[in-house]
Image: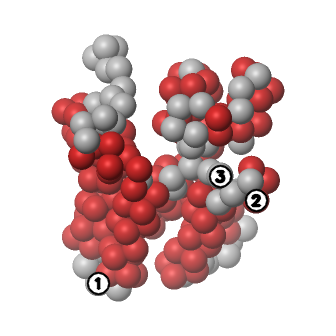
């Protein structure tokens, strides 16, 4: 979506600017706040739309089915076939998926994201910290759900893998920071 909006509205191929990612953060930086907000919402909805649609149609997905369907959405976000397999990093889509699976755990992880963002001004570091905290909070809010043991291993690994370049820049103190002057 961000590639198409960038081309149609701004005449820009997002994959050639900034971090070259098609996710929400690069959309904010390259395409502006309005388009960035739209992309952020769209990316979150990718992770939550299938279970919500199933619920509206009275289909009762199990948590395992929701996790698998969400995983397909995340993989499609990271490797979109219509954009040359060059997508975003999956953070917003995973957040959307877990908003359905564990709303309170997701809210707590969002709190970790915001605290880290306000203190470091680095979206990438905030995303990594939130991904590590998400399965912990999900487990604490749903201790009898074995699904969170599995996701607890894979969510942070996936986010860390998609942020390898960011981690190198953080270590070298070269990671771009966002402007939070509106606070």
Residue 161 lies, with reference to residue 28, above or below; the image says below
Q: Residue furthest left?
A: 119
Closer to the camera in the image, 7 or 44: 7
Residue 7 lies, with reference to residue 97, above or below; the image says above
Chain-order first, disc 1 or disc 3: 3
Closer to the camera in the image, 45 or 93: 93
Contact flag, marks 3 and 2 (Cβ < 8 Å) = no
State whether residue 96 appears in this view. no
Assign a secondary structure to mark 1: loop
Assign a secondary structure to mark 2: helix
In percent of the image, x 76 and y 59: which residue is there? 81
Contact flag, marks 1 and 3 (Cβ < 8 Å) = no
Q: CA distance from mark 1 to mark 3?
A: 37 Å
Res. 144 mark: 1
Q: Label 2, on which residue?
A: 81
Q: Label 3, on which residue?
A: 86
**Where is residue 100 shown, x and y percent of the image?**
49, 61
Chain-order first, disc 3 or disc 2: 2
| Relative side of 146 to 58, left or right | left
| Relative side of 50 to 112, left or right | right
Q: Residues within 10 Å of mark 1 (few under 14, many from 20)?
A: few
Residue 171 lies, with reference to residue 162, above or below; the image says above
């Amino acid at each position: 979506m961000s590639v198409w909006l960038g081309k149609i509205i701004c005449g820009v191929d997002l994959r050639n600017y900034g971090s070259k990612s098609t996710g929400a953060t690069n959309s904010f930086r390259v395409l502006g706040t309005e388009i960035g907000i739209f992309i952020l919402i769209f990316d979150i909805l990718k992770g939550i739309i299938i279970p919500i649609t199933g619920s509206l149609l009275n289909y009762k997905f199990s948590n395992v089915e929701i996790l698998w369907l969400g995983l397909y959405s995340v993989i499609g976000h990271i490797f979109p076939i219509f954009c040359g397999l060059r997508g975003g990093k999956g953070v917003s889509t995973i957040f959307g998926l877990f908003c359905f699976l564990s709303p309170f755990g997701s809210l707590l992880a969002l709190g970790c994201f915001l605290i880290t963002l306000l203190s470091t001004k680095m979206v990438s570091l905030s995303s990594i910290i939130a991904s590590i905290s998400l399965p912990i909070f999900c487990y604490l809010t749903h201790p009898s759900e074995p699904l969170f043991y599995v996701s607890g291993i894979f969510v942070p690994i996936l986010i860390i893998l998609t942020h390898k370049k960011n981690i190198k820049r953080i270590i070298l103190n070269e990671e771009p920071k966002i402007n939070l002057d509106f606070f």
